[in-house]
Image (tube, grey):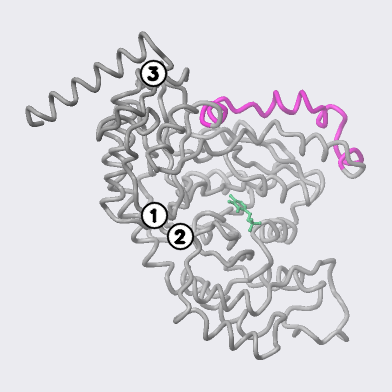
Amino acid sequence: MSNLSRRTFLKQNAILGLGAALSPALPSIAFPSVSTPAILGGTPLFKTEWPKWPRWNPETDEPRLLEVLRSGIWSRADVTAEFEQQWANALGMKRSLLVVNGTSALTIALNQLDIRAGDEVLIPPYTFIATAAAVLANGAMPVFVDVDPETFQIDPSRIEAKITPRTKAIMPVHILGLPADMPAILAIAKKHNLVVIEDACQAHLAEVNHQKVGTLGHAGCFSFQNSKNLAIGEGGAIVSSDDAFMDRCFSYQNFGYPYGNRVGSVSTGSIRQGSKLRITEYQAAIGLAQLARLDAETTTRNVNAAYLKSRLAAIPGIVPYKLYDHVTRGAFHLFPFRYQQQAFNGLSRTSFLKALQAEGVPCSSGYATLNDQLFLKDAFASKNFRKVYSRKMLNFNEYVARNACPMNAQLCNEEAVWFTQNMLLGTRQDMDLIADAVARVHQHSDTIRKQTNG
Ligand SMILES: *Cc1c(COP(=O)(O)O)cnc(C)c1O
């Protein structure tokens, strides 16, 4: 630091300190500088735009889409089959099945693995509601297994304590696009003869030991919702190496007609209880355009995430995610870290987020706790549930107590902070600016806390 800038720095800090101590009403905006945090009137560190999401390139992406639109063949047909083949190839699988969304993919997969009323399914609480909703939709009971706060993933060491004679499946979620500890989970599943359905809805192209997640269990499910790393708007996929299972899933999403039935032929008759969860051809055309970019984007996210992690780890009170040793690639749908308030002079997470947002860095506190929400109580009050489960099992307060997950509560209520995947598509300089913004908030945390009552 030069003499001049050092003097300026000291003067500004003296003024800020005075402002805080004597006159909270003193408008700090009168003293903007490079070092003053934006929330106290300084210039935001981040001035450029973040990469937009989803991406769309008219030149490369529109010809195929227009061709589909002009063809008049809009219901499931050859373009859907082409996307399914390409998605399977990207995962190193023989086939995949495209359906309307990730929630349906999970619901169908559970259903066709015969997870039904009376069964228990082990899931982590640190996830999107769809994981639990898919279990309930089949009349089965979600049982929550607490997470490892270092990885944000289901904690394998807590699984066996939750297994009962009713447990039929484990549904690990590769949450935030970081792979769960699959070797440990698969070993437990094998020992207890449990089905494994991977919720890979946030984990496109993530890998464990060079194998894509979603291909490691009996079935894997993906989402192509607008925010996801492969965005169609809505869409989902099921993968499995079990051909008979894949045939059944196909049949399910097409009214229970036998596998191979072409859309439009109605005379075959249905062979199983199903529904109609078919994707359209124009959605598949959008998917093909997005898939062409996915691998390169995934590499960019991995490189930027590793660099950002190394910079953030140097800031006291910031504890970035940990990857398991066997993870060979992340998907980084989100970039998570734990915020430790004590190292920021007691500045609350809410105020930390506001200060970071003021610097031009979008961030959030992520999920609320899932395992105590009222949708569970609502399901338990339904006629179907009351016919299958005992009164005791359906007592909501007892359920919440039985499913308490303190590590998850700590992440949700106190520590977790997320950056979104599109930020990781920025430049290395963008990553430096994110880290600089966090460092700036850390440096001024005491003043920020005093001046914002946070
Ligand atoms: C997005 C998501 C789903 C559901 O996918 P949709 O396509 O939105 O239905 C399921 N699980 C997780 C973890 C998700 O993030």
Q: Secondary structure at mark 2?
A: loop
Which residue sits furthest top?
22
Q: Residue under circle 1? A: 49
| Nearest to the observer: residue 48 or residue 315 | 48
| Residue plotted at (68% across, 76% down) | 280
Which residue sits furthest left?
3
| Nearest to the observer: residue 339 or residue 187 | 339
Task: Indicate which disc, 3 or 2, sits on the residue closer to the N terminus.
Answer: 3
- Please tell me whether mark 3 or mark 1 is closer to you in this view: 3
Task: Give the residue type that dot 3 points to.
Answer: Leu
Q: Which mark is residue 132?
A: none
If the image is split into quadrants, where does the N terminus sit? top left
Q: Viewed as shown, does residue 219 lie left or right of 261?
A: left
Task: Give the residue type that dot 1 points to.
Answer: Glu
Quick check: marks 2 and 1 in contact, CB under 8 Å? yes
Crowd band around label 1 with a 10 angstrom C-alpha radius: few (<14), some (14–19), many (20+): few
Q: CA distance from mark 2 to mark 1?
A: 8 Å
Q: Viewed as shown, does residue 439 lie left or right of 225?
A: left
Vertical order, 158 against 117 (above or below): above
| Nearest to the observer: residue 91 or residue 113 | 91
Q: Secondary structure at mark 3?
A: loop
- Please tell me whether mark 2 or mark 1 is closer to you in this view: 1
Whether 389 is among the magenta residues is yes
Q: CA distance from mark 3 to mark 2?
A: 38 Å
Task: Give the residue type that dot 2 points to.
Answer: Lys
Q: Residue under circle 2? A: 52
Asked if ligand 1 lies within 8 A of label 2, the reply is: no
Q: Residue under circle 3? A: 26
